[in-house]
Image: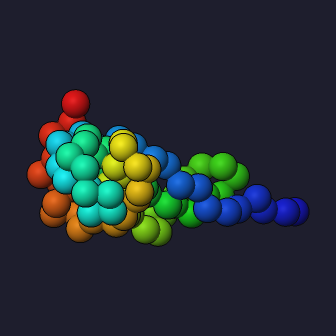
Amino acid sequence: MFFIFGFRTKVDRSGVTQQVCRNCGNSAAQVVTRRRTSFTLFFVPLVPVRTRYVQQCTYCGAEYAIPATDARRVSVD
């Protein structure tokens, strides 16, 4: 008998906000995404391992992690 297990990351768009980018300094749309990594067994996600929120500038493409409280304030568009 053998088991197929691993990790899978699901990316969900949480929203878009208009802010000044920390990297390039331009006022551009910032896309906020939630990245949830889960332990999978036979390709079925069982246990969430980690949840991260990332903000990405649409002008320069820079990505940086943000706290969950800041990500929850952004409305879904």
Q: Nearer the viewer, residue 75 or 22?
A: 22
Q: Residue 5: where, in percent of width, then height? A: 70, 62
Is the C terminus in the top left, top right, bottom left or bottom right quadrant? top left
> Which residue sits at x=43%, y=50%?
61
Residue that protrudes farthest toward the right in the picture: 1
For the question of whether residue 34 can be seen, the reply is: no
Q: Is residue 62 visible?
A: yes
- Give the image quarter of residue 3: bottom right
Q: Residue at 49% of width from left, 61% of height from top?
A: 37
Q: Find residue 24 and report its horizontal and vertical position in percent.
A: 32, 57
Residue 72 in picture, x, y percent from top left: 17, 53
Residue in the picture at 41% in, 49% down = 60
The image position of residue 47, as x and y in percent, is: 48, 63
- Which quarter shows the N terminus? bottom right
Q: Nearer the viewer, residue 46 or 62?
A: 62
> In the image, what residue occupies the spot 57% across and 63% down?
39
The front one of 51 and 16 is 16
Classify residue 70 as left or right of residue 22. Answer: left
- The residue most toward the front is 25
Quarter location, residue 76: top left
